[in-house]
Image (cartoon, rainbow, N blue to C red):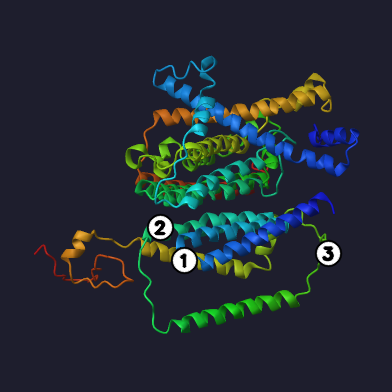
Amino acid sequence: MNSGIDLQGSLIDTLKDFGLPPGVAKAIWLPLPMLLMIIGATVGVLVVVWLERKISAAAQQRIGPEFTGPLGVLQPVADGMKLVFKEDVVPARSDRWLFTLGPIVVVIPVFLSYLIVPFGQNLVITDLNVGIFLWIALSSIAPIGLLMSGYASNNKYSLLGGLRAAAQSISYEIPLAFSVLAIAMMSNSLSTIDIVEQQSGYGILGWNLWRQPVGFIIFWIAALAECERLPFDLPEAEEELVAGYQTEYAGMKFGLFYLGSYVNLVLSALIFAILYLGGWEFPIPLERLAGWLGVSETTPWLQIVTASLGIVMTLLKAYFLVFIAILLRWTVPRVRIDQLLNLGWKFLLPVSLANLLITAALKLAFPVAFGG
Amino acid sequence: MTLAEGVQIVSFGILAVMVLGSALGVVLLTNIVYSAFLLGGVFISIAGLYVLLNAEFVAAAQVLIYVGAVNVLILFAIMLVNKREDFSSIPRRWIRQGATGIVCFGLFALLGTMILITPWSLAPTSSAVIENSIVEIGKHFFSDFLLPFELASVLLLMAMVGAIILARRDIIPEVAIAKEREIVSTSLTLPERPREIASIGSSPTKEQ
């Protein structure tokens, strides 16, 4: 297995050439990928907000933002600036500490989950053994923050919204975890790198999409519910609960919720791309193409091309999924809370359990195709 | 001391302070909601300690189960009940407090002696580095820890059956309760439609 481009090694070597001790060089390297990932996630959110505005406008036969920058691309920046400069109101008789802590508890786990998102063979912050399990574990912290802000607001709509958010998140975590477990069983690993590696080699035909047709639908429904996207945005259903747990929030605290929900959407799309759409893989197996063209795998320019193609492919797949999510939001009506819980517990849970069992049986019966 | 060791020591200090501080907060604060949120802090800090011990799977499982499920359920229960009841002083309350103190001290002494008499291997790097802890945990579950594993699953199954039985009771609206005065309600019973005793054969029905 060729190691590809080693950014860490080359940067540390460069710094050592400037006469820095190795420890300092490593310490300079350490925060770089994390900073890059946080900035990337935030820019990704700006793109999604712009897409949401433009696509919703198209779905409703409007034009959408068009004066701020070319095609209105600066509109999300303007939104963000507005939120930064808004007065930060803490309602009277609310619980000041929990009120402030709530949005923070919601946002931090979402950003932490970016630790395990790979954009290429070596383009990942950490390749953990528990990988995808870490994402599931971290996403289960968010309901605590929602309950916290719902309780602290001292508002009945907020409390109801927080309780709904927690109930929804608990119910849909289980089918989500089961569909991820089926993938982990086929890949023999929880590491995101291994999961993508296991899908590589046959181009688009090798992707888990074809081997987990039920699993990917369950995962998508559950992921939309976890992100509180529209067919399942019960916690902030405007007609019933004003804005749910966000009702009393203004300024940057509301901004954190807003940011968190969109970062979570992009994250879910990225994880979906990794689990079912082959991550950074090109639809045509690039190694074989290079082999036919007679280019060696270790050629520097080929490695650069494949690495950049990997990043582009991951982002393309993720943003395609984001597009579908936005289109769903503006075309599908909201479900009721009882329908939501019925769908989660009485339909998705048994189906995902059956999917898990069938995957295990297929893995034993056809170890070639299902990763023995 | 290398960079990694320094980071480890500093994070151990922060995590230890977080565990102790939030655990004391859970016990000493009077507002039960704060206690429940701080309990989540205790669980998260303990997960951090597991990470420091290279037990990443246990850490993730700790976060998923204790923070994501147990603590959310505790919060849920507190917020759904939301019973504002003044604390009435119970006669001879010191007996309870004394018994609690004795039990807690006994547990503390037991754990303390356990920590002191166990011959810990204090080598900075352990000799057997486990590459994939999940595989090792799975092997242990299905070989030498099979009985505890199965017992735990039976216990969870019992809890689930109990939860289903509790959830399936018919709750009647409050208007109906006012009409049916004969329902005896104590502080421990939920408002519930009286169970009809299943009788085979001739039953006195209203159709006649």
What amino acid is labelled 2 in the image? Met
- Nearest the viewer among B39 and B200 is B39
- Nearest the viewer among B63 and A269 is B63
Q: Position of residue A160 (x, y in %)?
A: 37, 49
**Disc 3 or 2, which lies upstream in sequence?**
2
Q: Nearer the viewer, mark 1 or mark 2?
A: 1
Q: CA distance from mark 1 to mark 3?
A: 43 Å
What amino acid is labelled 1 in the image? Thr
Q: Position of residue A300 (x, y in %)?
A: 83, 25
Q: In the rendering, which numbered label is found on residue B30?
A: 1
Chain letter of mark 1 equals B
Mark 3 and mark 2 on one chain: yes
Residue to which mark 3 is pinned: B123
Residue A251, compared with residue A337, is above or below; it is: above
Q: Quadrant of residue B144?
A: bottom right
- Nearest the viewer among A211 and B96 is B96
Q: CA distance from mark 3 to mark 2?
A: 47 Å
Is residue A240 shown to the viewer in this render?
yes
Residue to which mark 2 is pinned: B79
Mark 2 neighbour density, 10 Å: few (under 14) some (14–19) many (20 or more) = some
